[in-house]
Image (cartoon, rainbow, N blue to C red):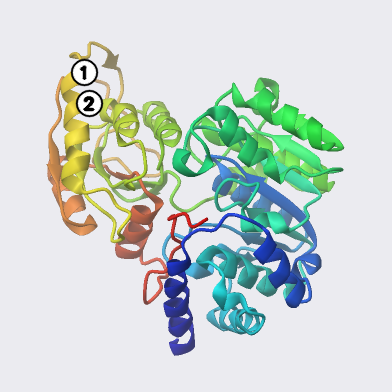
Amino acid sequence: MSAYRDLLVRLVGARRFGMKLGLERMHELLKKLDHPERRIGRVVHVAGTNGKGSTVAMLAALVRASGSRVATYTSPHLSTLRERIQIDGVLASEDAIVAAAARVDAAGGADLTFFEQVTAIGLCVIAEANVDVSILEVGLGGRLDATNAVDAPVAVVTGVAMDHEQILGDTLAAIAGEKAGIFKRRQRVVIGASGEPAAVPLLVEHARAVGVDHITVIDDAAIASVPPVALAGAHQRANAAAALAALDELHLACDRIGVLARVSHPGRFEIAGELILDGAHNPHGARALAATLREQELRPSLVIAVSSDKDARAIAEALAPEVSAVVATRYQQERALDPEALADVFRSVISSRSAPTSLSPGLRSAASFGAAEPAVVAAAHHRAPAIPVDTAPDLEAAVAAARAHGTPVLVAGSLFLVGEARTRFLGAPTDPIVATESLARRD
């Protein structure tokens, strides 16, 4: 434990380097490491504004079911760095991560950013695991992301929406260009439907411009053909369609129906008793969460924290109509927006809404929530024109306040908050100190 803790301390120290977009440092480091990225089997590279994690989770489950060994590299983690590196669904061990980190450090990696170091560590761990397929999730953007130093025969962009505008650009076209930066000549490319429709032709144009071998565009027909998916929300069917298309590009066969009916993904409409945990951290994700609440006929109390660089008003506009109360809080990192500022955003959105007139014919009762077959309340439910908005200094106080307004309680708005909730309420594995990347750009 001490060696692993010491590593986390060193990685936290790497935050001083901020975020440096570019591939030269990664290419040089991988060369000094004798190219571990060339020993990780066939690679699927996954980018996109939303849906990356769910698509990776479904694709990994499908690949495992085909009888192939599969590794995943994802970010950010919810409660432990080990989540980022998994072999056949099992979190990398502390010892494996420490050993790989020693190699990276000896090759000069200590002078790189947090994300660059962790990416190199992940590639070294995976290279030792003798896997058949590796699925790498982009950290941010795509074109200049550290994972793009790896050649991948299959590339997936789940979709493009507005997010991280201060880094990726303030137009859909600019962000699409960054995401499409993972496309390379002779690749097999999947373009998903988990973003804004206007971005799809932009992605197709970029793919054709670099000379990819084949493009699969996920359309309504592809989504309609997806078998039932265990993950809640219509948007997950689009993610599943992208995962299935990537599986086809790998020429692997498995029981697709059985896999998708069982697949799980922590922190994505994850139900735990009277809690719902969902990392809807940007406007597009918040709208997908709102749609899922309507589909599930739920109107929970909301505990929410968002990062200070997010469009909090757009998130509030999506979620406020679907919840019965709001408790604004913060996750325990400096990026979190002040709870009072977040609460003011929700109050402004709520006060600007006209009194709703729509009726919902059947909402789940709080008592039945979380049961295998929840009952449905027959009486119509009138949505109130205004809902209470409170603040709390931390997650535990926020959940207690939300419970006082009624259950279920939805914890949302940031994957970091969801990670804290999984540790506190689900007993998820957690690190002795919080170690995450910085999004402060250093050019």
User: Where is residue 123, by image quadrant?
Assistant: bottom right
Contact, CB < 8 Å: mark 1 with mark 2?
A: yes
- Rendered location of residue 63, percent (x, y): 73, 53
Q: Which residue type does callout 1 highlight?
A: Arg
Q: Which residue lies under the disc numbered 2?
A: 349
Residue found 28% across the figure and 47% down from its top:
305
Give the secondary structure at mark 2.
Answer: helix
Q: In the drawing, does residue 138 fall left or right of residue 380?
A: right
Residue found 48% across the figure and 81% down from its top:
7
Q: Which residue lies under the disc numbered 1?
A: 353
Work out which quarter of the rendered image holds the N terminus and state it. bottom left
Along the line of sight, the residue nearer the viewer: 37 or 325: 37
Q: Where is 115 relative to 128, above or below?
A: above
Residue found 68% across the figure and 39% down from its top:
180
Q: Which residue type does callout 2 highlight?
A: Val
Task: For residue 421, say whether it is visible.
Answer: yes
Q: In the drawing, does residue 69 fall left or right of residue 306?
A: right
Residue positioned most to the front:
443
Q: Residues within 10 Å of mark 1 (few under 14, many from 20)?
A: few
Q: Where is 56 relative to 374, above or below?
A: below
Along the line of sight, the residue nearer the viewer: 381 or 354: 354
Q: Residues within 10 Å of mark 2 (few under 14, many from 20)?
A: some
Task: For residue 384, say whether it is visible.
Answer: no
- The CA distance from mark 1 to mark 2 is 6 Å
Residue found 21% across the figure and 33% down from its top:
346
Q: In the drawing, does residue 200 fall left or right of residue 40?
A: left
Q: Where is 421 relative to 201, above or below?
A: below
